[in-house]
């Protein structure tokens, strides 16, 4: 074999590192409005190309164009903008609270607000999300009390989860928000199971699974695809590709070719890519996929192309692994700015209303925060109690736990 | 009342709960049309429909992961892992998810799921068809772990497991499927029809989770056993003439502490028997608990008889298996100790 | 949501069940010679269609046709035929031995002989296979002593694995045959790691991973695809689609659409489908993929379309779940018959030589069996020893095992 | 000789072996360019090249699975699982594959692989950043399990682990990364530079696997501890005035039986301490072994002080953590027993 060169390990690297100029020239961005809209019962083979493109509605001039446009009234679009402003304001306050030592940990969804906010609006009551830690927008876009989210973040006496969970691992059955797990990807396949149950029961409710670009590498991603495609489960499988997984760029999970959406093709699944910073596009695609699921036409895989503008969490400092300016250079822009400009262009909004709305939301959040803090913050002590720690491991407390609780003196 | 094998009892349990509760669904590898490689789900698909009993892809974490999602959505899935040796890919979903969903959601979401799996050796299955992973489940809070030793219990415990509101791991000693094997592999096989506990009532009944049962009352030494080892312990007792009190634990977690402690306080001696690898096996926990709670009653060290700390070998199966000779020797040893 | 029908769970089913007429009309079989042969350095995007077709060389008249033909001399093809006859004879004897109670378990590769036998011939010394239990052809097609395979099956005193492993779980480092595991799919990702190591070390050796259609559903399949594509590992990833996984038809692992090969597209991986009952086609495709790996061009995914003609194992009775005649109806025929007819058509072989060769191989196998049985069979007792059971858990025996061995009295 | 944190010691260990042995490779999530979320692999990529230290996809079973393949092909991979809580998806590859490849191939194929993972709580990480899964490893034969309690040992044990020819699980108590935490969470943090075992020799040295060390010689009671709990036990001893002999196990499997037995025979009492959930934790095995081998020397029950059988909670972290008060109470309890 002397005529063969020695093999060499290939390790993908991002285009740029700290100190370099941000460079997104490799990201292929089709023109807004240019991607067609298949019928919801079309055969996935007929639109495989959509997994290699990006569905976009808002163009550079903030106009809504193409076959995926015109799905939301002025009012609905304004609600969308408000929802995004609200979650951004919430994130900013909670981030600050963590910095002030009021809790141990926090995670923002900065830059990705459109995805959860718009998706939520396309769902119906009774549908269930299986979110990651970055879909707080699914809750803040409903009337779930923000104060309860704060109570959870503070692990205080009013924490609905009794201090048991890390901040941001919310849970609300009523609001279709499944308990967030700290283990990546596990929820994705649970979403498929939930959806299968809906079909087994002859229900009309559907499920939505959520996963990050980095987490698609996990085994549970595969399980989800296998079960969802085999049983044609009524589930929408959402990949939020925000380019980064902590310090690791998406090329490590994906390799250098294909797209995350293209993983659906091996399972005969309809697979779409969408501009995740375009509220209107996200809504339109979500609506399409949800309708498909609810009509018993099976699962859809959606990749949202976006950018994680903030650090991974309060424990992270991205300047160690990517250029500081990369976020600003992101070619798909900011979801709030884009929808705002669109609404202004549409004459349904103004700079003034925007400033007022932002201020109103910030003050609402601040108000809620004050209320929440009356119930305590993480280190203010005392609550939740050690007794709460022993409860709820099983439906009924078994003897050995009773003895341990006694040993703990509570 | 019918004589059943353990396979039939298990099948009957699922049939009975599926008949009374339409939220019970059964799936796993080869369990649908074919009825499972051990035939535990035979005819369930025909009787209850393809959407309530079906074949699953070969993906154990997917089987448990989807079952969790179903349970969260109001069903009571009872899934089969083809051999306990293949539950390891599902261990994350079992130990990190199913076990904690009630706790982490403060009771909003719960996982009434049963995971059945054939366990143990004695069938020349080699290292990947013989393992007994119970200690990996007992270490995890939030799940229950059950091991029946006969058809009567198997049916009653399985119905109780499926109807339980917490996740239950249901370990089926495969060497007991067709008869009460006592470790004498060179003797003719005895069928369940010849054993009183092969007698299995028709219809619905439960054997409560968390309750042990005394299989043999004795004065000299307490034997803690479960699954196949209950029968091995009975044979060893018979053969040594030691007057042992044999406790069939049935549920390993939560453990029936009272029954165990009462017995050991009476006998002052304790032998713990299991087929799994010794180090960090469930016998370690039993030994630790007994000596913590009955220390002053003990006249001899709590003694473990277990599989060795090697993989389960193929040809040397009977040298690995803790048969009646080894259990008998331990009984005599603890009786001689002072 | 009253305008939605109740959802319904879809459960794929095979076309036929026992009692029905076998029906393979759904299996789309392109004409031999009709599928093109891309350059080995071609970009995978250019030949995605190959994952939806079947590469075939031998046509109905047993001629070798098309761009994948003409790779083997008469002599090489005759060796191929002999290899297939040998492994079939070996399987038949060992199956019989199991029925006679000489061992606990056996698994044949009946009907799938071409795949392992031809693939083996395309490898170079030092390459490593990570096989399943159905690639005994990888060993029998080398000069690895058949008697040692039998000794392993018998767990006798000469068993190279000391009785520790279930029959057929062979292992031979020297012959590039990694120790077979009873856990499905685990070896597939180990193959990728082995190949990565080759690249890290600057070696020229490549790895081959093997997996069954049913086992592609396992998580390790996904891990393999992720790591192989990201690091462009020099590995050939082989899926043997023999239509069945014990009693479960391939549609449960695959769903009703796409192909197993198409799973490679989500990873930008070249993905080929080949007639697994066509020795010449298997060889040609193997050669192509192995060359690609060795030239540092990365991994290839190959799906071999074949049929498991025998029961899953000696513990299985397929008449409970598929029509008895299904095997005969399999449209791709028998690999031995097809190569034999081709060689005869090519004037390199004759019915007589075939009968003689078969007889010679059967007597060689019988001879080896007699030799092996001199070393004992499973229940003839005594060997391997209990001492062997305690050895080799660690490189050096630790204290607690020494004590246990003592307790065992050996 | 330099004062190092445990992070620096671990990093230095890898750097040293990578420098002398080109077959050593390091990979895991975020370990390449960035150097790991705890910075244990910082600068290794820059120094030893991208092909010897690199980022891995978020797939723990793939990380371990590929590492096994590499080890089989002659490398010595040392991989990082970002938190021990995320090793569960890899548990199949660890417990069913890495552990048995030597055995099942009769020594033809071996797996000289090290799997590093931060373990334990005390950092408000909640249930998925705090677990201590050591008992899940000690139950598996064929692998070794190591837990260092200080920078000196961490470096020496990690070098020994990477150079060992069997698979080694290397558990790093993350609460010790930056200082010798003794459980007094309300006191100022002490850095390793103030601790004698922060003193870490330059270059290559090993601390042998399988050997415990006596951290404090004492006459009254033997304390078996490892990782963070060694420091907690020291504090408890100090505070109660009980003359405890504190054994830092360092390697849990294979266990240094001689050191343990000798000590318990001397003191006649034993307290076992760990942070993991109690039931079927490694303390059960230690308790069982001690009473099996030292029964006649014991004057009090072997007593366990452990995490409770609940998930590791977020807000109630210090009620869960077995701190010096609980260890101290146990010390007094066993001293009063008779
Ligand atoms: C099983 C598991 N492995 C590793 C981690 C540690 N971890 C937490 S978040 C994260 C990155 C996830 O990235 P991505 O999926 O892209 O989601 P994003 O944070 O970008 O939203 C990692 C590695 C974990 N939580 N669970
Ligand atoms: C992890 C795991 N799950 C389940 C099994 C049981 N099992 C053994 S072979 C088999 C079917 C495999 O089918 P396939 O992959 O198509 O391979 P084939 O037998 O057809 O060659 C199953 C389910 C196993 N050995 N390992
Ligand atoms: Mg991401
Ligand atoms: Mg198959």
Image (tube, coloured by chain):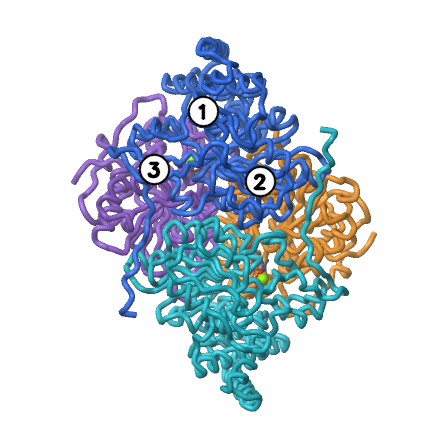
Chain colours: A cyan, B purple, C blue, D orange
Badge 2 crowding class, 10 Å Cα cut-off, few under 14, some 14 to 19, many 20 or more, is many
N-terminal of the pair, mark 1 or mark 3, is 3
Residue shown at 48% from the left, 16% from the top: C344
Q: Is residue A260 visible?
A: yes
Q: Which residue is mark 1?
A: C335
Left-right relation of A193 to C238: left
Q: Looking at the image, is C387 positioned above or below residue A113?
A: above
Provide the chain ID for the residue under circle 2.
C
For numbered disc 1, what is the local secondary structure? Answer: helix
Q: Looking at the image, is C35 positioned above or below residue D1?
A: above
Provide the chain ID for the residue under circle 1.
C
Instruction: Please tell me if label 2 and label 3 are on a single chain.
Output: yes
Provide the chain ID for the residue under circle 3.
C
**Is the C-beta of the residue carrying label 3 under 8 Å from the nearest atom of ligand 4?**
no
Q: Position of residue C202 (x, y in %)?
A: 73, 38
Q: Which residue is mark 3?
A: C25
């Amino acid at each position: 074999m002397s005529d063969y060169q020695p093999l060499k390990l290939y390790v993908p690297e991002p285009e740029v590192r700290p100190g370099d100029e941000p460079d997104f020239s490799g990201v292929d961005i089709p023109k807004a409005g240019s991607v067609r809209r298949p019928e919801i019962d079309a055969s996935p083979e007929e639109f495989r190309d959509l997994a290699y493109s990006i569905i976009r509605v808002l163009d550079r001039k903030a106009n809504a164009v193409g076959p995926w446009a015109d799905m939301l009234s002025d009012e609905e679009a304004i609600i969308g903008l408000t929802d995004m402003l609200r979650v951004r304001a919430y994130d900013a306050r909670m981030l600050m609270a963590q910095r002030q030592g009021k809790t141990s940990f926090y995670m923002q969804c900065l830059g990705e607000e459109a995805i959860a906010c718009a998706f939520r609006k396309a769902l119906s009551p009774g549908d269930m999300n299986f979110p990651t830690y970055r879909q707080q927008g699914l809750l803040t876009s409903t009337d779930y009390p923000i104060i309860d989210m704060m109570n959870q973040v503070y692990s205080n006496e009013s924490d609905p989860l009794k201090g048991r969970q890390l901040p941001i691992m919310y849970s609300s059955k009523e609001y279709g928000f499944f308990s967030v797990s700290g283990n990546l990807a596990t929820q994705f396949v649970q979403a498929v199971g939930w959806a299968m149950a809906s079909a087994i029961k002859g229900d009309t409710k559907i499920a939505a699974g959520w996963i990050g670009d980095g987490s698609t590498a996990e085994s549970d991603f595969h399980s989800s695809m296998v079960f969802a495609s085999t049983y044609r489960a009524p589930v929408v499988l959402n990949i939020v590709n925000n380019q980064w997984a902590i310090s690791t760029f998406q090329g490590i999970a994906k390799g250098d070719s294909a797209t995350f959406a293209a993983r659906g093709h091996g399972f005969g699944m309809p697979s779409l890519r969408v501009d995740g910073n375009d509220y209107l596009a996200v809504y339109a695609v979500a609506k399409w996929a949800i309708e498909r699921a609810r009509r018993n036409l099976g699962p859809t895989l959606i990749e949202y192309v976006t950018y994680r503008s903030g650090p991974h969490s309060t424990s992270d400092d991205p300047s160690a692994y990517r250029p500081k300016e990369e976020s600003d250079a992101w070619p798909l822009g900011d979801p709030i700015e884009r929808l705002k400009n669109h609404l202004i262009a549409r004459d349904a909004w103004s700079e003034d209303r925007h400033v007022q709305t932002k201020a109103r939301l910030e003050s609402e959040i601040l108000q809620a925060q004050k209320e929440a803090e009356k119930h305590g913050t993480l280190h203010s002590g005392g609550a939740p109690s050690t007794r709460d720690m022993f409860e709820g491991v099983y439906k009924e407390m078994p003897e050995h736990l009773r003895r341990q609780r006694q040993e703990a003196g509570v | 009342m019918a004589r059943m094998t353990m396979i039939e009892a298990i099948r009957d349990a699922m049939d009975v709960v599926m008949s009374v509760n339409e939220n019970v669904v059964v799936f796993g590898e080869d369990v649908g049309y074919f009825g499972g490689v051990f035939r535990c789900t035979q005819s369930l698909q025909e009787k209850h429909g393809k959407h309530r009993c079906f074949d699953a892809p070969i993906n154990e974490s997917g089987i448990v992961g989807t079952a969790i999602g179903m349970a969260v959505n109001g069903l009571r899935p009872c899934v089969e892992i083809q051999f306990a040796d293949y539950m390891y890919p599902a261990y994350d979903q079992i130990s990190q998810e199913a076990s904690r969903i009630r706790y982490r959601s403060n009771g909003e979401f719960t996982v009434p799921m049963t995971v059945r799996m054939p366990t143990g050796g004695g069938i020349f299955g080699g290292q990947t068809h013989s393992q007994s992973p119970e200690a990996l489940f007992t270490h995890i809070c939030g799940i229950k772990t059950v091991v029946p030793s006969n058809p009567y219990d198997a049916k009653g415990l399985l119905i109780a497991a499926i109807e339980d509101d917490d996740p239950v791991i249901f370990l089926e000693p495969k060497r007991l499927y067709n008869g009460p094997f006592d470790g004498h592999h060179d003797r003719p096989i005895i069928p369940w029809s010849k054993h009183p506990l092969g007698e299995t009532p028709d219809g619905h009944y439960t054997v409560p989770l968390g309750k042990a049962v005394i299989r043999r009352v004795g004065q000299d030494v307490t034997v803690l056993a479960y699954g196949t080892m209950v029968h091995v312990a009975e044979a060893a007792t018979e053969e040594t003439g030691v007057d042992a009190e044999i406790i069939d634990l049935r549920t390993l977690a939560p453990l029936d502490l009272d029954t165990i402690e009462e017995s050991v306080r009476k006998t002052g001696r304790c032998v713990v028997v299991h087929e799994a690898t010794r180090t960090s096996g469930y016998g370690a926990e039993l030994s630790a608990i007994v000596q913590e709670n009955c220390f002053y009653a003990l006249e001899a060290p709590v003694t473990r008889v277990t599989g060795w700390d090697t993989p389960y070998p193929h040809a040397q199966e009977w040298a690995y298996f803790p048969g009646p000779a080894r259990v008998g020797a331990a009984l005599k040893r603890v009786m001689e100790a002072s």
